[in-house]
Image (tube, rainbow, N blue to C red):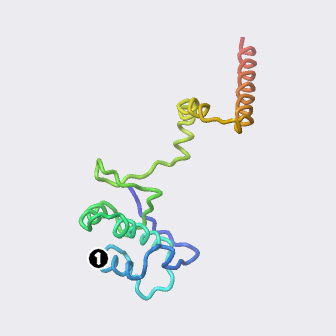
Amino acid sequence: MIVPNRQTDLFKHKLTESGCSLHQADLLFKENLLSFNPTGKEEYEGFEIEELRFLKSLYFDSGFSINIVEAMLSKLEKPYGYSFNKIYWDYGSQEWKELPNIDSYINDNLRDIIFDNFDEFLDNLCEDDTAELSTIKDAINKRLKKLALQNHENI
């Protein structure tokens, strides 16, 4: 389940950090999209700025009709404290989905990633990369020697 950010920050933020004008923020509030009234506020919580950024991207920047934006938002919980760095709209399933944690994906798939991309890596090396290639060659040779010693000890 995708959960909105509601965590308060130690520091307050200015409206300009959201990329929204006060007029845009007020319009989002009047459209019943924004979870707080931006009028008269001097400072904002981080999750409010995140909500403004998210809604601005969908409502003002995307080019989607208001009907499409409302349909997309109906699949999320208010306040809309979401980030496009963490979720995306899957047009096939018409659902919001979480982006995978790239660090755990890389760790879980490192061997496949290396083998799948190694030939391309080698093809793209240029003369300036000879030191890097030498380092890789040395690391492979050390690993092969270590494996040979382990295999010899197991005999």
Question: Relative to residue 73, is residue 151 drawn left or right?
Answer: right
Residue most toward the left?
A: 67
Give residue 108's quadrant in the image: top right
Is residue 47 positioned above or below 104 on the image?
A: below
Give residue 64's quadrant in the image: bottom left
For the N terminus, the image quarter is bottom left
For the C terminus, the image quarter is top right
| Percent x, y of residue 38 | 41, 82
Q: Amino acid at mark 1?
A: Glu
Q: Which residue lies at the image location 28% right of the left edge and 52% below the top edge?
A: 94
Q: Which residue lies at the image location 42% right of the left edge and 56% below the top edge?
A: 87
Is residue 41 positioned above or below 106 on the image?
A: below
Choose between 28 and 48: the one closer to the eye: 28
| Percent x, y of residue 50 | 46, 69
Residue ID for mark 1: 31
Residue most toward the bottom?
A: 40
Is residue 120 positioned above or below 48 on the image?
A: above
Choose between 133 and 16: the one closer to the eye: 133
Is residue 145 positioned above or below 123 on the image?
A: above
Give the structural element (helix, strand or loop) at label 1: loop
Choose between 13 and 150: the one closer to the eye: 13
Question: Relative to residue 7, is residue 61 drawn left or right?
Answer: left
Q: Which residue lies at the image location 75% right of the left edge and 29% below the top edge?
A: 138
